[in-house]
Amino acid sequence: MGRGTDTPASWSLGDGQPVPWEYAPAPEARDIVSLKSRYGMFIGGKEVAPRSGEWFTTLDPATEEPLAEVARAGVEDVAHAVGVARRAFRREWGALAGRERAKYLFRIARILQERSREFAVLESLDGGKPIKESRDVDVPLAAAHFWYYAGWADKLEYAFPARNPQPLGVAAQVIPWNFPLLMLAWKIAPALAAGNTVVLKPASSTPLSALLFADVCRQAELPPGVVNIVTGPGEIGLALVKHPDVDKVAFTGSTVVGKTIGRAIAGSDKALTLELGGKAANIVFDDAPIEQAIEGVVNGIFFNQGEVCCAGSRLFVQESIAEPFIERLKDRLSTLRVGDPLDKNTDVGAINNAAQLAKIEELVEAGQAEGADMYQPACELPARGYFVRPTLFTNVAQSSRIAQEEIFGPVLSVLTFRTPAEAIEKANNTPYGLSAGVWTEKGSRILSMVSKLRAGVVWANTFNRFDPTSPFGGYKESGFGREGGLHGLLAYLDLAGEGH
Ligand code: NDP
């Protein structure tokens, strides 16, 4: 094994000290992606320059280098896109037979698979996530959503028998930067399968995979105007969801913005689903398979640098095993490789943007100031880019900010419990309710915990498992509505004239 001169040492023997060797660099070739210097929006099947004449720059968060300029939409561009989507709905897509819509969705799924390496590299470049995750999780799951919903497009009558399922019309979809392509697929695939047309706004720090998806739509010969992509800041997202000709709003992102959107469209007849933040409890009982649980806890919080709404950011360990479990966890943390997202050996890539890095750093400082004990493995971070060390806090008070607030970074707060009742009480002590994990050998305990945890998704002896057939969504401040499965389809349909 060689030692790359510019690759940080991020591997250790388990005592927190780096070992004297390093994995040889294994960079994925980036030339499969040909970046343009400028990207217009995608409206009516064409690349369109912004009527505002303004552009913004998207960066590579691992190097802070600019990747491309992207159109900064104005409200007139939003109106143009919604008008085009309305016409496409009225003239063609809304009345197209389900089996015909399915053909386009199958085509999109197949093209995503054919171009999977290109998408994976672009997603890692623009978003900072490790290539092994974009390659093995984001892109295959995005394609799987199109396959799955393609299968439903001509079976809506069977999915909702005797309810006369009808599309809603034009869907406005605003997505975040943590899973840009996957969130696009979660939104666009069910909308199209149900017969709606869409205008989607990606996050400003990760617009490129949505714009590459525009190319997939062209390649699939999707009728113009069925999918439209507008790029620009948050205020453009707000203008889009408020547009009077929009029938359905789907948002994934922060709870603050979710509330703003809810207020902005209150009193209108727009249908709304919100998938917001989380502060998931990952609960480990003393009879759990320990090595499996360690891997699950690590995956739960360090997958995608912890920038995951359902991240297992609060670990509850049964007191009787807490000490050895935490020691074992620290050892495992010290083997995580932090660095270049395009290196196939990287476990923890770059934080998506400078503001998010500042937020993580602020909360890590708050954790220390509030008296929790911090552990970070002794790994070097790259000299440039938005990187942060995997961080573990013990001795955490329930009331502290790191136990209450969504950090959205690779930071784990460890707490303990004695009885299942105490675990439930502590786990539910959060304004959020998106996901949870339970680790135990006892099936009866799993069933009992699942019924008492206030979370939309509970994983047992695993974590962060996703499947297009399985609905996902939250309670409380984590939002409402479900994505995935039949529930996900329902959010884009009007049943038997019930309205929405
Ligand atoms: P936001 O909620 O601000 O961004 C999500 C999307 O909403 C982006 O496309 C954004 O556009 C857009 N947006 C921003 N403001 C508005 C608005 N007023 N009306 C309509 N759309 C809007 O998340 P941030 O990027 O600011 O991240 C902040 C925090 O949110 C994170 O630290 C994390 O805790 C949480 N978060 C949660 C996510 C989840 O999946 N649950 C995902 C992302 C963040 P633009 O990018 O142009 O600002």
Image (tube, grey):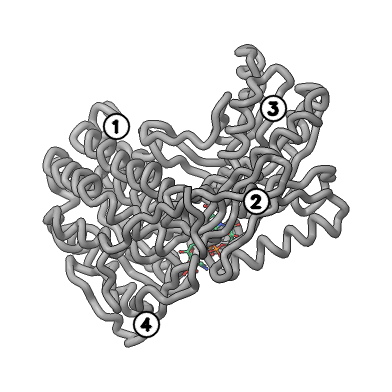
Q: Position of residue 163 (x, y in %)?
A: 29, 32
The residue at the point 49 percent across, 67 percent down is 61
First-in-chain label (1 vs 3): 1
Which residue does the numbered mark 3 point to in the structure image? 284
Q: Nearer the viewer, mark 2 or mark 1?
A: 2
Q: Nearer the viewer, mark 3 or mark 4?
A: 3
The reply to whether residue 249 is in sight is no
Q: Nearer the viewer, mark 1 or mark 4?
A: 4
Q: Position of residue 450 (x, y in %)?
A: 62, 24
Residue 255 found in image quarter: bottom right
> In the image as oriented, which residue stretches furthest toward the bottom?
53
Q: Which mark is residue 55?
A: 4
The reply to whether residue 156 is in sight is yes
**Crowd class of label 2 (few under 14; some 14 to 19; many from 20; radius 10 Å):** many
Q: CA distance from mark 1 to mark 4?
A: 46 Å
Which residue does the numbered mark 1 point to in the structure image? 163
Q: Which mark is residue 262?
A: none
Vertical arrangement, residue 12 with respect to residue 383, above or below: above
Q: CA distance from mark 3 to mark 4?
A: 49 Å
